[in-house]
Image (cartoon, rainbow, N blue to C red):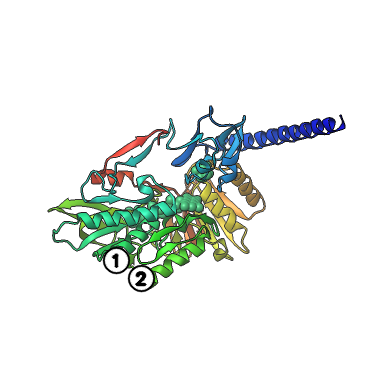
Amino acid sequence: MNYLYIYLFAILLIMTLYVRHYRRRHASDSAELEQAVQSGLAEPASLHPVVDPSRCMGSGSCATACPEEALGVINGKMALKNAAACIGHGACLAACPTEAITLVFGTESRGIDIPNISPDFETNVPGIYIAGELGGMGLIRKAAQQGREAMAAIRKKLGSQAADFDVVIVGCGPAGLSAGLSAIHHKLRYKLIEQEDSLGGAVYHYPRQKIAMTAPFELDLVGKVKFSEVQKEKLIEFWMDIVKKTGLKVSFRERMESIDKENNRFVVRTSRGSYTARTVLLTMGRRGTPRKLEVPGEETPKVTYRLIDPAQYCGQAVLVVGGGDSALEAAIAISQEEGTDVTLSYRSAAFSRVKQKNRLLLEQQQKAGRLRILLNSNVRSIDEKLVVIEHDGVPQRYRNDAVIVCAGGLLPTPLLQKIGIEFNTKFGTA
Ligand SMILES: Cc1cc2nc3c(=O)[nH]c(=O)nc-3n(C[C@H](O)[C@H](O)[C@H](O)COP(=O)(O)OP(=O)(O)OC[C@H]3O[C@@H](n4cnc5c(N)ncnc54)[C@H](O)[C@@H]3O)c2cc1C
Ligand code: SF4
């Protein structure tokens, strides 16, 4: 009889603990979702999971597996509580014991344009290929694999028309880097251009010391790359070392501006010149090109379009331009450095789509006199030692050592449509 009581007590205890855990999780995940909705950040950027509620049993294994902490369990079912953090690598899908999860592009209200590509990565414009995230498939491993496969396909279909290059590769993220190595491997005449001053693509822009998770992948000339978890800086260093060892040539700070077909070959116009090519491989990702201010002085080296290391601004007067989370995070981080004088300029009257956490930290730093916020303001010019900002219609001069512009990006879609590449808009479909 005693055993029965002990047994019943144990069951009751387990059930009580389970219900308490369930309620706590529901409450905290709901609060996080609510905050994302209020901040206007409830829409995923691209590929993301959706759940079939009839199959989901609320085990939470998807949420545990998600390295970006994008998932939660609300009302006993999987929920994308932090949609902006989802990068679509599908760890949740693999972890789901009931196969209730599907990965889809876009949502009912926000379509995502995915280019039409054949199985060998060729677009509807014969001779123009797309690999990596631009084609819809994110992840370091998949981008690298596609870059390699696309180059193998290009080699097989290469024509014999006269041109400067067999292939021009646009973009040096994981896909472009891998494609460049394959071009050397296949003895192709290639030109690899990158608009930024470093390789790495999206990885270069990860937050400092972010751990990237990746399954092993193969690179031509290098062999199997066996990282599973690797710090962003280490990965970039590893790729730079490959460039050095293999002699891969990357033309940095060169942006592709247009592609035209002339006499059976392509003319690729860039910010530095123009080249003729038999084929073009676009490995441009989906981040686009940083939006510029288009003001006098913007071309000076003190103007950048991302924050890499706040510590480098120690003791400096820094202007951050923009009103999104990246602008706020940059201004906050720099204002926490010793001796900085930070100004945050934003052209609208209020910050709208930003995380509550950033809003609070910003207010805190402003109250502490660590930064000034200029709403309704526009940068008019940038000089060696100062900037002119028009604030509420009045131009004012501020001491300045560095400018960081976080004004979003120009998406690659219009540029590609001009080239003739066709897209499919996906509204929450695979
Ligand atoms: C915050 C974050 C975290 C992530 N974490 C992971 C992770 O842990 N594991 C993982 O596997 N994946 C992760 N990803 C996804 C992964 O980084 C991307 O899927 C991958 O980098 C895509 O590679 P890509 O080469 O196709 O494109 P990108 O990496 O975007 O590279 C494209 C390159 O093309 C250049 N370019 C664009 N337009 C032009 C132009 N007109 N002219 C010249 N150059 C141009 C760009 O400057 C860029 O360097 C993460 C993504 C983000 C945003
Ligand atoms: S796709 Fe990746 S980032 Fe998005 S929810 Fe699933 S595991 Fe998390």
Q: Position of residue 42 (x, y in %)?
A: 52, 36
Q: Secondary structure at mark 1?
A: helix
Q: Sort mark 2 into few (<14), some (14-19) or many (20+) by Cα contacts within 10 Å.
A: few
Q: Is residue 351 left or right of residue 186?
A: right
Mark 2 and mark 1 lie on one chain; the one further toward the N terminus is 1
Report the front residue among 209 and 377: 209
Find residue 331 and report its image quarter: bottom right
68 in relation to 33, above or below: below
Residue closest to the eye, 34 or 369: 34
Question: In the picture, which quadrant includes the C terminus?
Answer: top left
Residue 243: percent from the left, percent from the top?
A: 38, 68
Q: Residues within 10 Å of mark 1 (few under 14, many from 20)?
A: some
Q: Quadrant of residue 421?
A: top left
Q: What amino acid type is highlighted by mark number 2?
A: Thr
Element assignment for label 2: helix
Q: Nearer the viewer, residue 417 or 430?
A: 430
Task: Reply above or below: 46 against 131.
Answer: above
Q: Is mark 1 within 8 Å of ligand 1?
A: no
- In the drawing, does residue 316 fall left or right of residue 252? right
Which residue is the site of mark 1? 184
Measured from the top left, where is residue 24 in percent x and y? 70, 36
| Picture residue at 36% right of the left edge, 60% below the top | 178
Mark-to-mark CA distance, 2 and 1 = 9 Å
Q: Quadrant of the N terminus?
A: top right
Position above or below: 167 against 130? below
* Place of residue 139 in the rendered image (x, y in percent of width and height, measured from the top left): 44, 51
* Horizontal side, residue 347 vs residue 163: left or right: right
Q: Which residue is mark 2?
A: 246
- Contact between marks 2 and 1 (CB within 8 A): the answer is yes
Residue, far top? 54
Q: In screen coordinates, is 173 left or right of 41? A: left
